[in-house]
Image: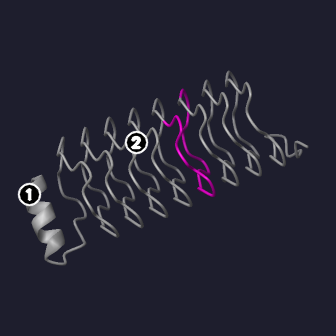
Amino acid sequence: MDAQEIMKRYAEGQRDFSHVSLVQVCLTKANLIGVKLIGADLVGANLSGAELTEAHLKQAKLNQANLADAEMTQACLTHADLSGADLSGADLTQANLSGADLSGAKLGGTDLSGANLAKADLSDVDLRCADLSGANLRETDLTDANLDGAYLGGADLTGAEIQGATINRAELSKTTMPDGTVHR
């Protein structure tokens, strides 16, 4: 399936494209609200600026994909592979990324407020100036992550691995730290 085919079928009302192969497809600024791409292969796809609000991308392969500035509010990305993906400036407010692999991803300036990142792999991730307010980061791997200037107010980092993480100028008010204490 190619970009024209998926856009044609979406315009006709089809929403379920689970398990399709869309490797390196170009869907920049595509309107795909509520689309189901469960288990889809989107390796290297260009979805920059795409509208993916409430999209279902559970177990999707999005490694090396370009999702910069994408609108992904309340999207389901549980156990998705987003390793090496570019999500800079994306809106992932209240998205579910539990168990997702985001290792090496670019998340600078991303809005992850209220997102569920429990047990996700965020090792070696760029989260500079990202909004993680109220995010669930329980048991998340943040090894060597860059959180410079990130907003973590009210985030829950209980049991998170933060060895080697850079947290300069980060806002930590009311953040639950890995050991369970609440930062004042």
The disc, 2 or 1, on the residue closer to the chain's N-terminal end is 1
- Asked whether residue 109 is drawn in magenta, I would say yes
- Asked whether residue 114 is drawn in magenta, I would say yes
Residues at marks 2 and 1 touching, judged by CB atoms closer than 8 Å: no
Seen from the viewer's position, the closer of residues 30 and 65 is: 30
Seen from the viewer's position, the closer of residues 60 and 45 is: 45
Q: Residue most toward the bottom?
A: 13
> Does 63 appear above or below 11?
above
Residue 146 is left or right of residue 168, and the answer is: left
Seen from the viewer's position, the closer of residues 102 and 128 is: 128
Where disc 1 sits, the SS reads helix
Kind of residue indicated by mark 2: Leu
Where is residue 59? Give x, y as percent.
38, 54
Where is residue 52? Give x, y as percent.
36, 60
Q: In which quarter of the image is residue 65?
A: top left
The coloring applied to the image is one colour
The residue beneath circle 1 is 4
**The C terminus lies in which quarter of the figure?**
top right
Q: What stretch is highlighted in magenta?
A: 107-124
The residue beneath circle 2 is 82
Where disc 2 sits, the SS reads loop
Residue 11 is left or right of residue 39, and the answer is: left
Task: Identify the residue at image location x=34%, y=39%.
Answer: 63
Magenta region's main secondary structure? loop
Task: Identify the residue at image location x=19%, y=78%.
Answer: 13
